[in-house]
Amino acid sequence: MLDLSGKVAIVTGASRGIGRAVAMGLAARGAHVIAAARGDHAAQTVAAIHEAGGRASMASLDVTDSGAVDAMVGGALEQHGRVDILVNNAGITRDQLLLRMKRDDWDQVIATNLTAAFGCSQAVLRPMIKQRGGRIISISSVVGQTGNAGQANYAASKAGLIGFAKALAREVASRNITVNVVAPGLIDTDMTRTITDKAQGDWAAQIPLGRLGAAEEVAAAVCFLASDEASYITGQVLAVNGGMYM
């Protein structure tokens, strides 16, 4: 198993689904995880990590609040003296055909899925540069690569994460900071479980491996990119989609 002992990781949107699996995966490999989410939504994630013998703490914040993000990173530095890994996972959907999409639905998705990644990444850069090393990993989506009707806002935000990562990777590579993206396909989470069995079957028919992915499979990709084994990988998109998009 990859060894992340002594590393400090921040995971946004850590209350459920992929974010929770990522937080638990990093903790299982030895990292101290700061599980960030609104309110006390990440409390169950932290409790599960503790129950499994890992180390974790909770950060309660709205990732679109830049002041709260700065306070979270400052608190991590005060308590641990470093931040080694940032996983930008927080995300929302507000699906609608563009002709009917409200400006607020566009703004909220961009703010949460893309602008928050900018804010969180900017907040951790100074300590990562000072310690001459770090890992920034953003969770995009196959939709950011293929597009999807009714998700212009979501697709734009997820595609934006890819361009953002490639640009930032070039800026900070000389400081031994890597910046990468994981792009999941259709993953078995609370969100996809609301889809009808027929719809799930239709989706699975488009996936060469013939099934939905597991959140733990996405987490494994994140943990690899966060590890020393991935020290020569930056500016890349690692697709975890069962062959849905090649």
Image: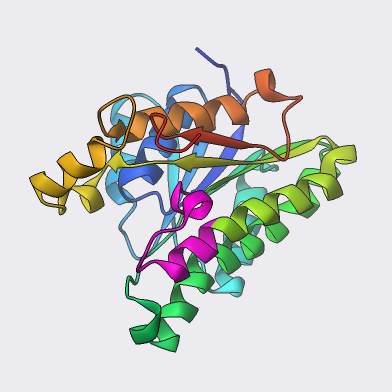
* Residue 146 drawn at (x, y percent): 48, 51
Depth check, front residue: 202 or 240 = 202
* Residue 118 drawn at (x, y percent): 65, 62
**Residue at screen point 90% across, 39% down:** 174
Relative to 3, say whether 85 is above or below: below
Depth check, front residue: 67 or 95 = 95
Asked if residue 61 lies in the magenta stretch, the reply is no
Number of marks in the image?
Answer: 0
Asked if residue 152 lies in the magenta stretch, the reply is yes
Q: Residue furthest left?
A: 197
Residue range corresponding to the magenta coloring: 140-158
In the rendered structure, the answer to whether residue 22 lies left or right of residue 211 reads right
Relative to 127, say whether 184 is above or below: above
Q: Residue furthest top?
A: 1
* Residue 201 drawn at (x, y percent): 16, 39
Image quarter for residue 67? bottom right
Depth check, front residue: 189 or 242 = 242
**Residue at screen point 45% across, 46% down:** 142
Q: Is residue 78 something one can see in this rendering?
A: no
**Residue at screen point 34% across, 27% down:** 208
Q: Residue furthest right?
A: 174
* Residue 187 drawn at (x, y percent): 31, 40
